Image: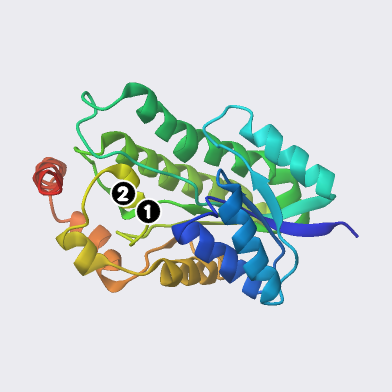
């Protein structure tokens, strides 16, 4: 029988690292994908030392168009099949879209949208065969327009919409699709994005470890969307009571405070 693995992108830091730990703790063999080989090697060693199966390490830059081919080739070489795909890799940039570097903003789309879509679809036959699942890491930003981080917010809206549609298509084939939508999480994300954590981080903050645990539970329970933390759960409900134009202006003013 071919061994099965859980493929996890963005595994070198933050929520991705914690998701790898959670899946490994629950008996999954994990295939870890990220750019930083040293961090993946350290995480793999930690998982093995804790009694988990030896992880597969795939050092790969998801901004590159051939990333999916490289991941598939590495898994084929290891002789494994994917039963769960966890798309955690993603990043954003803070600032006005017309002032930020255009190439870097297109890289956001490459990672947050293209790579996530490709990996969700590329392994679909294997997921159906093993009646597995997909956990796509979105964000509470996916529910909002985001002046100040326009491309990032839009990319997370795509993740939410795509995942819900894919869930509808794959449910009859026995595949679960869950979107994990955290709020601000203390991680390297803020530093790369270029902003300082503010009041929202203090109020809506949930640790990366707790977000990962909630995501795993939600996927196994076949939930459509997981919103970790009470504040995050309330926000989408509150948005229904305000006009879109009001929300747009409010988010824009709020983002300016992060400069």
- Contact, mark 1 vs mark 2 (Cβ under 8 Å): yes
Snapshot quadrant of residue 186:
bottom left
Residue at left 28%, top 64%?
232
Which element type, helix, strand or loop, lies under badge 2? Answer: helix
Q: Position of residue 189 (x, y in %)?
A: 36, 50
Colour scheme of this structure image?
Answer: rainbow
Q: Crowding near pointer 2: few (<14 within 10 Å), some, many (20+)?
A: some
Work out whether residue 64 can be spotted: yes
Judge from the rendering whether residue 252 lies leftward or rightward of residue 84; answer left or right: left
Judge from the rendering whether residue 71 lies leftward or rightward of residue 103; answer left or right: right
Residue at left 87%, top 56%?
2
Judge from the rendering whether residue 122 lies leftward or rightward of residue 152; answer left or right: right
How many marks are shown on the rendered structure?
A: 2
For residue 56, above or below residue 157 = below
Residue located beneath label 1 in the image: 188
Which element type, helix, strand or loop, lies under badge 1? Answer: loop
Task: Pick the residue in front: 147 or 11.
Answer: 11
Farthest residue to the right: give it: 1
Task: Pick the residue in front: 112 or 193.
Answer: 193
Judge from the rendering whether residue 48 lies leftward or rightward of residue 147; answer left or right: right
Using the image, tell me which numbered label, if any, was put on residue 191: 2
Q: CA distance from mark 1 to mark 2?
A: 5 Å
Q: Position of residue 167 (x, y in %)?
A: 55, 51
Task: Pick the residue in front: 127 or 53.
Answer: 53
Q: Position of residue 166 (x, y in %)?
A: 55, 45
């Amino acid at each position: 029988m071919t061994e099965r693995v859980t493929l996890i992108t963005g595994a070198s830091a933050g929520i991705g690292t914690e998701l790898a730990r959670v899946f490994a703790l629950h008996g999954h063999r994990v295939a870890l994908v990220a750019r930083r080989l040293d961090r993946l090697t350290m995480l793999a060693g930690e998982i093995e030392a804790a009694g988990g199966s030896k992880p597969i390490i795939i050092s790969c830059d998801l901004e590159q168009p051939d990333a999916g081919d490289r991941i598939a080739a590495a898994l084929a070489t290891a002789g494994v099949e994917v039963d769960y795909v966890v798309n955690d890799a993603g990043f954003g940039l803070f600032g006005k879209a017309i002032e930020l570097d255009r190439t870097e903003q297109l890289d956001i789309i490459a990672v947050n949208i293209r790579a996530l879509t490709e990996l969700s679809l590329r392994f679909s036959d294997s997921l159906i065969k093993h009646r597995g699942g997909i956990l796509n890491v979105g964000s509470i930003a996916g529910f909002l327009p985001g002046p100040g981080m326009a491309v990032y917010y839009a990319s997370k809206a795509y993740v939410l919409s795509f995942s819900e549609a894919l869930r509808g298509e794959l449910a009859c084939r026995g595949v679960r699709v869950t979107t994990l939508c955290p709020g601000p999480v203390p991680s390297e994300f803020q530093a790369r994005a270029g902003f300082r954590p503010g009041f929202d981080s203090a109020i809506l903050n949930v640790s990366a470890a707790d977000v990962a645990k909630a995501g795993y539970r939600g996927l196994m329970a076949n939930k459509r969307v997981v919103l970790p933390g009470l504040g995050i759960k309330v926000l989408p409900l509150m948005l229904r009571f305000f006009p879109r134009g009001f929300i747009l202006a409010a988010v824009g003013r709020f983002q300016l405070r992060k400069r």
